[in-house]
Image (cartoon, rainbow, N blue to C red):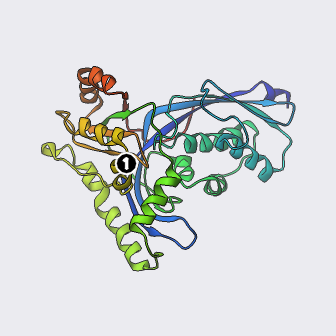
Amino acid sequence: MQDLAKTKIIIKSPAKINLHLEVIGKREDGFHELAMIMQNIDLSDYLEFQINNEGLIKLDSDCNELSLSDDNLIVKSANLLRKKSNIDFGANIFLRKNIPIGAGLAGGSSNAAATLIGLNKLWDLKLDQKTLSSLASTLGSDIPFFMNGGIQLCFGRGEILEKLDSTLEYGVILLKNPNVSVSTAETYKKYSKRFCDKYLTDREMIKNIRKNLRDNGFNNLNNLNFENQHLSIKNDLQLVVENENNSVKQALYLLSKLENCLSFSMSGSGPTCFALFKDIETAKKELTANYKLFRNKGYDSWVCTFLKKGITFI
């Protein structure tokens, strides 16, 4: 225990964007049946873990907007892992927050997965990937993706994952108005009210949509660079959010006008929007040329790369 008490573990906890988000329908369990491509990007939070001798989970952060209580996914994940492992250890956790909150980038889900991975190592629990992923799925629909990360097909409510070979090296520009956030739960409710008037029972349709995304979705993304081909990225939630949220509508318009933009979309339930470029250098040049415009229109902006894997130890 003395040796463990001196150990500090630092984990990089990256955001994600949705390169495809299709709501197939509402399931009888209240969740939605989804078909998605999710991709980690190099906009990351950092979590530091140390054992404490009090058997308590103590969370602190440099972000004043964040609850540090039991409703925080980091605390929920830590308490779930303690209960599962039946241990008396506690942990001091510090979160350095870079991923904006309520942004459609799944920062909270990433942090939850990072907590499971980090405390599994800190507490020397030796739980395997399958066990950790099973715990992750009980905490939230996006969290299992982050256990492996990179680029993956995500089916079901997000817990059925198929890893893809990561060959994409696009540059990304993100835009988000810092004063605007969107509730994922509310967005799904609104989408459901408009487009899912009946429960989904057609298993054959689900099977066909999954097959189509396997066969075509990744290939379309892979071919973007050829002859400056443009691709329309599908995000069904955008149908709801764009009509209600001027910051999303304007961000998509600004991104669509960028000279070297290969594709653009909203991520998740928004309000963050993104554009893809052939490489990081092109994305950096575009941001430099348009940074003042974005700032004057009220947006924070970032340049990112795609990551081949997700959560990593520093």
Question: Circle 1 — which element?
Answer: helix
Give left or right: position of 88 versus 236.
right
Residue 159, horizontal then vertical, whole percent: 54, 59
Q: Residue at x 37, y 54 (%)?
A: 240
Q: Which residue is mark 1?
A: 244
Disc tally is 1
In the rendered structure, which amino acid carries the disc numbered 1? Glu
- Could you tell me residue 30's position as x and y percent? 56, 67
Residue 200 appears in the picture as rendered = yes
- Judge whether 35 appears above or below 13 on screen: below
Residue 133 is left or right of residue 191, and the answer is right
Q: Nearer the viewer, residue 13 or 289?
A: 289
Quadrant the N terminus occupies: top right
Nearer to me, 12 or 249: 249
The percent coordinates of residue 175 (x first, y second) are 36, 33
As drawn, 45 above or below 19: above
Q: Is residue 280 left or right of residue 313?
A: left
| Residue at position x 51%, y 28% in the image | 98
